[in-house]
Image: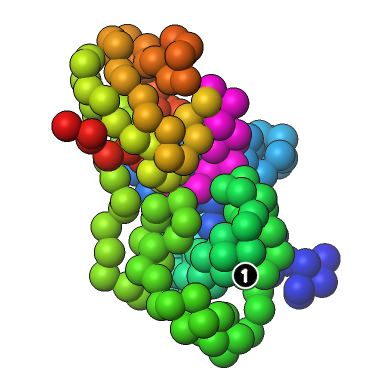
């Protein structure tokens, strides 16, 4: 495998681990497999390699986290990605599209991306409500999973911009800007009213949806 192909493969894994850590505090093989569309056996093989190269640290029976070296590699990529998302949002792409297309832009030279950053007004967070590394900002809201029965909230973003969970959230009607009422807390998620319908939101998806209280 050539140097460029290897670099892109490493970046994809490290960025995915970063995003999973943002939401769940740890990256598990199954979630990495789902995000990257790669078989779990392949994921395990690559993660062992990344651990041997010092990019990730394995916590027995729990999952993986980025090492200091891995986090340094990822920060500039996440910054580029989220700045490019802000630019694509200005062009009118939806939350799923701008995340997908920014993936192709995150390897642009830093000088170009910083020019884009200034052009879009030097935002502190991306359109999904996540902080841009290097800027002092907190997520746009709290995870939906933290709200209780009777709470009314507005969806303001998607923690970690995890493709599989964003698609799941949008399919349930949890689009950005939508108002949601939590009806009950379930063992493995929430029951909510959204758009006149009652939906069950699994816990992991609820942890990725950012919301702000309406009260």
The quarter of the rendered structure image containing the N terminus is bottom right
Q: Is residue 151 above or below residue 142?
A: above
Q: Is residue 183 above or below residue 146?
A: above
Q: Nearer the viewer, residue 33 or 56?
A: 33
Q: Quadrant of residue 99?
A: bottom right
Q: Quadrant of residue 159?
A: top left
Q: Is residue 71 above or below residue 157?
A: below
The magenta segment is 160-172
Magenta span contains residue 163: yes
The colour scheme applied to this rendered structure is rainbow
- Mark 1: give few (<14), some (14-19) or many (20+) Cα within 10 Å: many
What residue occupies the far bottom of the structure in this picture?
Answer: 111
Q: Nearer the viewer, residue 60 or 73?
A: 73
Residue 73 drawn at (x, y percent): 50, 71
Q: Which residue is mark 1?
A: 106
Q: Along the horizontal axis of the image, is 107 left or right of 138?
A: right
Q: Quadrant of residue 154?
A: top left
Residue at horizontal 46%, vertical 51%?
A: 128
Q: Is residue 44 visible?
A: no
**Local secondary structure at mark 1:** loop
What residue occupies the far front of the structure in this picture?
Answer: 196
Q: Is residue 214 visible?
A: yes
Residue 120 drawn at (x, y percent): 49, 76
Q: Along the horizontal axis of the image, is 42 left or right of 163?
A: right
Residue 24 drawn at (x, y percent): 37, 39
Residue at horizontal 60%, vertical 86%?
A: 112
Magenta span contains residue 88: no
Residue at horizontal 39%, vertical 55%?
A: 130
The quarter of the rendered structure image containing the C terminus is top left
Magenta-drawn stretch, dominant element (helix, strand or loop): helix
What residue occupies the far left of the structure in this picture?
Answer: 215
Residue at horizontal 65%, vertical 74%?
A: 107
């Amino acid at each position: 495998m050539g140097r460029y192909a290897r670099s892109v493969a490493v970046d994809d894994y490290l960025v995915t681990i970063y995003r999973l850590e943002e939401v769940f505090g740890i990256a598990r093989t199954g979630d990495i497999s789902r995000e990257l569309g790669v078989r779990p056996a392949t994921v395990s093989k690559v993660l062992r390699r990344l651990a041997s190269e010092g990019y990730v640290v394995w916590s027995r029976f729990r999952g993986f986290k980025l090492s200091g070296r891995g986090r340094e590699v990822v920060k500039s990529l996440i910054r580029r990605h989220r700045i490019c998302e802000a630019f694509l949002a200005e062009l009118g792409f939806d939350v799923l599209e701008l995340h997908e297309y920014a993936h192709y832009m995150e390897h642009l030279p830093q000088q170009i991306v910083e020019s884009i950053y200034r052009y879009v007004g030097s935002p502190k967070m991306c359109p999904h409500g996540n902080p841009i590394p290097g800027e002092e900002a907190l997520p746009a809201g709290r995870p939906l999973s933290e709200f209780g029965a009777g709470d009314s909230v507005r969806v303001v973003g998607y923690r970690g911009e995890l493709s599989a969970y964003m698609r799941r959230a949008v399919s349930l009607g949890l689009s950005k800007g939508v108002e949601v009422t939590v009806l009950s807390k379930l063992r493995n998620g929430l029951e909510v009213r959204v758009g006149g319908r009652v939906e069950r939101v699994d816990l992991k998806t609820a942890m990725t949806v950012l919301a702000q209280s309406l009260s």
